[in-house]
Image (spheres, grey):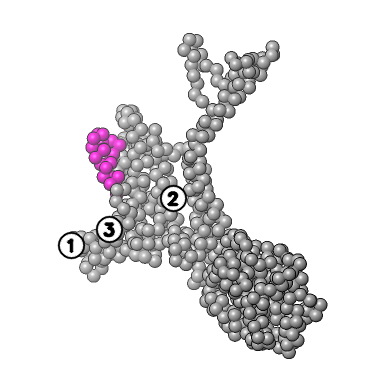
Amino acid sequence: MSDVTDATTGKAAPTPDDGLRIADSNEGGPVLAADGTPLKKSLSRTLRRQKMRALLLIAPLLIFVLVTFIVPIVSMLLRSVDNTIVPDTLPQTVSAIAEWDPTASDLPDEPVYEALYYDLFLASEAKEHTKLGTRLNYELTGLSSQFRSVGRDLDEIGEDQIDALEDLAEDTWDNETFWFDLMRGGENAEESDQSVLDDARKRLQVLTGDSYSGGTGFLPGAEISALLPRTAYEYASFAVYTAIAEEDVVAEEEPWEAVKIALIQELQAGADVASYSGFGAEQLVAAQEMLAEQPQPNFKDAFLEIDKGWGNPLTWKTLSVYKASYTPGYFLNAADYQLGFDGVEARPANQQIYIKLFMRTLYMSLIITGSCILLGYPVAWILANLPLRTANVLMILVLLPFWTSLLVRTSAWKVLLQQQGVINEILVWLGFVHDANRLILMNNATGTIIAMTHILLPFMILPLYSVMKTIPPSYLRAAKSLGATNVTAFRRVYFPQSVPGIGAGSILVFILSIGYYITPEIVGGTDGVFISNRIAYHISSSLNWGLAAALGTILLVVVLVLYWCYDRIVGIDNVKLGG
């Protein structure tokens, strides 16, 4: 708070803080305000109101920064390590595969394939299995098509046992109403098991991200749920999805094949149906007797028949490595490493591209920044020392590119720089270049540097101009009057005072250049693209948002580290935009 002078005494007027100290030091009792309240309390209330008013004034800016800057950065940081899609889609498989030892056997045992069947069946019905395939395809090429193919053919697993069950009695095991009455324990069921339905609802919520709230028109019977827990759970999942997602009547829809496979497995495993006396007891006993002569479903052989990829040890190692909810895999890939079953390992030499792109981005950004300093400094000096009217006209020319679309300016450089473009034509006409040896200025680093220097040059000129405008010309005249030459006066008097403008312009140009991707994409070819082009590719084309977030996070950290180094060496307090 600035000092306020009392007009009558000429002394600084007391501030609210001074009033608080006076009130505390008064030993003859509290000093009262005009309204009779203690002065200390009154001043505290006044200060609190002032702070609240100040907070309300900046609240819109704080909310804007929070929504447009902080939240996206936090979201990017979380996405760069998020891997919840794997345990959310395959919870039973993740639990079962934890006990698999790849050193003891190339492929996991039957229980893992069984868990995979039930997980993928629900995921395929909810149309979520392809998302998981896309995620794992980033780590092992081919898994995307593998998940799609198995999603189409899951209903064929156990087909012989299901046909035998449905042929056992007419209008029974292929009848929707019979299944509905069986799983709710009949019309007169005394007790129901709400927990089974809640578990199925929660499972679908985690899998799809939808709420799945609302009625289903179905409650599992307590007795049948205790007798056939797996069947009851699978039917409850079917009922929740049918009633809420598909908005159909559960009693009118035939249950999924997974429900029937669960029943077959539990009956073959020796479920005590003889002690059950509820609805469908006779049919359950008859089914158990018939299924005793049937082979048990073999999930492992069925998966291998659908796609040989399920017999590839790399498939299961990939699932085992990426089974956790959070993974460093994206960051490792961004650094040309990968997460293997035995730990961190380098990616093959032909796949190591990101470190090279990072180094190229930093190197070319520094060159562009240096080019802008060399070109922008004399322009800013001329503008700062010309008469105001002339300087304003030239400043319009500096600002003119801002009135043109970035895409248009970049496309214009594409026309200028190509081998049959204007620049090469002029050089050939002047005889500097032979027609057969035209310069290659496009689809390489040279084209990117030229185009981006032109585009970012105003961001260097403006800070330099604003700082140079504040340097009094009398300083140079005084130095010359003391015997300094023009070069000495510039080097020892003028240039040091313009350094803050160089710092401000360098920070602006460098930070903007490392994030550019339109210009390198159009004129850079394969040798002039930046890491930002790869980030854009993963966001819009490959849809690998986790890797894009990791690359963006690393780029952010690099910028912050360079900013810290600049502050330590030059001092951020010395950066000025004028004044």
The residue closer to the viewer here, 433 or 352, is: 352
Q: Residue at x 40, y 55 (%)?
A: 516
In the rendered image, which quarter contains the C terminus? top left
Image location (x, y in percent) of residue 270: 78, 81
Question: Of the residues under marks 3 and 2, which one precedes in the sequence?
Answer: 3
Tell me where residue 482 sits by quadrant.
Answer: top left
Whether 335 is among the magenta residues is no
Q: Categorize mark 1 by other alpha carbons within 10 Å: few (<14), some (14-19), many (20+).
A: few
Residue under pointer 2: 511
Q: Magenta region: which residues?
A: 382-401
- Relative placement, left or right, of 205 versus 381 is right
Residue 243 location (% of width, % of height): 59, 67
Q: Which residue is mark 1?
A: 429
- Asked if 123 appears above or below 548 in the picture, the reply is below
Q: Which secondary structure type mostly characterizes the magenta part of the structure?
A: helix
In the image, residue 461 above or below residue 172? above
Extreme residue in the bottom direction = 293
The residue beneath circle 3 is: 412
Q: Residue at x 52, y 48 (%)?
A: 70
Q: Amino acid at mark 2?
A: Ile
Which residue is rendered at x = 73% and y = 82% of the image?
A: 283
Looking at the rendering, which quadrant does residue 172 occupy? bottom right
The amino acid at mark 3 is: Ala
Pick whichever, 569 or 98, lies toward us: 98
Estimate the spatial distance between the alpha carbons at disc 1 and disc 3, rounded to whole Å.
21 Å
Residue 483 relative to residue 319: left or right: left
Q: Nearer the viewer, mark 1 or mark 3?
A: 3
